Amino acid sequence: MDLEYLNSEILKNYINGKWVDSTTDETRDVINPASGEVLAKTPICTKEEALETIKAAKEAFWKWRTTPAQSRIRYLYDFRDALEENFDDLVEVVTKEHGKTLDESRGEYRRAIENVEAATHIPSLQMGYNFEEIASGIDEMVIKQPLGVFFCVAPFNFPVMVPAWFWPYAIATGNTYIVKPSDQCPISMVKQFEILDEIGLPKGVVNLLHGGPEVVNALVESPDTVGLSFVGSTKVGKLLYKKCGEVGKRVQVQGGAKNFITIMPDANIDRTVPNLITSFFGNAGQRCLAGGVLLTVGDVHNPLKEKLIESTKQIKVGDGMDEDNHMGPLASEAGMKKVLEYIQKGIDEGATLVLDGRNVRDDESLKNGFYVGPTIFENVSPEMSIAQEEIFGPVMPIVNVKNLDEAIEVIHNNPYGNASSIFTSSGKSARDYQYLVKAGNIGINIGVAAPIATFPFSGMKDSFMGDLHGQGKSGIDFFTEDKVVITRWFD
Ligand code: NAD
């Protein structure tokens, strides 16, 4: 496998089993955020190229749908093996184009592989059910059938894992697929398709199409696609959810987040602090499951804050390729500027900056990258922008509340509901939290409540639109239609 970096080449699409140059004149630079170096260019493809891709996936559908499931999943086993063989090289590509540390890229790849493995269980996951004698001599059954061409529109922050929440299940259930990766971080997906090409998956079964709104709109509007899995900002997600509704398309939208983490006075502080550091500052805060606001309950505030500051100061910021570093840069210049703006807003709105991550920018060796170090605010009120809006960076706003009821009220006044965690040694507080808090993924003494592949990746309120989540049984239902068959045989 050729894992040379692409030296500013324009990336190709993978359509109908072939690498194809785009006809567009418009490109976007893919930049290594640790150094500012241009790694490649993403073609911002056209509507015509989207239609060509849909045609290929549609033509491949019937042959693939009539291929027995056991044969379909054999390709996934081969793919999994190839990922393992090339693991270290593939991990490097994620770090180069995204900026996260090698260890974080390994974690991302592990999750992607887990999804490929889960999709190999399709012969049991896709089973229907039946019941005999619903009336005299009559039986009834449900079979779960594939539907056609599905596609995903993916974000920049997990360029490999997020598409893997969808495409392996879609093709294992007998559908064909189009991946539209983030135009900011598309190289990792190109590398995945190089492997898919090598293992000889039949042409048209999975396709890679680069671009932005023009191709996404064409995919949504086409009568020849059946469903969209979108992961990205709530703003774009809402737009696409509405469009899918208008054209009658299946859709699951996993949107933005502001995740609240509540620390009760009875929490084990020493065990809690490392979890909080990972939750708020892991992946430089660019996780949809990242801690967004820390809610300290009562007098846990001061002792927790002191330990947090002390531990956070130990985080070494730098190029993710260096194993000694704990945190890489933000993934883009725009992302960095947004974080810096929020830090300024926090100061302007009256919060107290107790750890200023902007200082890392004084380091000469980091000057070409998009670095902001871990930042902590206290005296934050729930109405402030830094406590309300998704920053998507390494910023921890701390809001002190009186009790659990007040914590839950603050959480419920926020529009998002992706994840929320409580740290406590009380079963009663934990149970109340899981029962009451309106968030799709709840952590109890867990800082990043990330479901494994066999559970749905949930989300509520503005963090999710649709009925069926990605992964788990929900994911299988999304990619299949239940057909009911009622039978009677005469003498
Ligand atoms: P984004 O919304 O800017 O882009 C996501 C995708 O949509 C990209 O592929 C992009 O090319 C495409 N796109 C952008 N504008 C579009 C438009 N007008 N019409 C059609 N398509 C368009 O998101 P991002 O910045 O890449 O990702 C970060 C966001 O993703 C954060 O809000 C984060 O919380 C969210 N996210 C959510 C989850 C989840 O599971 N809920 C997981 C990961 C990331």
Image (spheres, rainbow, N blue to C red):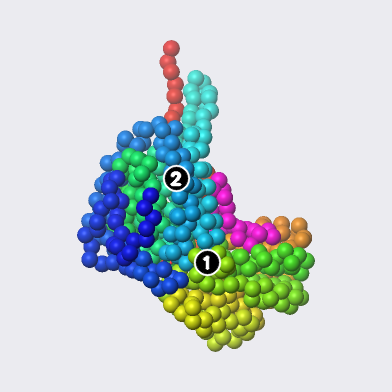
**Distance of label 1 from label 2 (alpha carbons):** 25 Å
What span is in magenta?
437-460
Image quadrant assignment for residue 23: bottom left
Name the residue: 44% across, 37% down. 73
Name the residue: 73% across, 78% down. 302
Q: Is residue 284 visible?
A: no
Q: Circle 2: is it few (<14), some (14-19), or many (20+) Cα within 10 Å?
A: some
Name the residue: 74% across, 67% down. 270
297 and 111: which is toward the camera: 111
Image quadrant assignment for residue 277: bottom right
Q: Quadrant of ligand 1?
A: bottom left
321 and 24: which is toward the camera: 321
Query: Is residue 459 on the magenta stretch?
Result: yes
Tag 2: amino acid: Ala
Task: Name the residue that disc number 2 marks.
Answer: 82
The percent position of residue 378, horizontal first and vertical second, equals 64, 80
Quadrant in which the C terminus is drawn: top left
The percent position of residue 427, horizontal first and vertical second, equals 76, 57
Q: Which mark is residue 322?
A: 1
Q: Earlier in the sequence, mark 1 or mark 2?
A: 2
Q: Secondary structure at mark 1?
A: loop
The percent position of residue 341, horizontal first and vertical second, equals 48, 81
Image quadrant assignment for residue 331: bottom left
Q: Is residue 330 above or below residue 418?
A: below
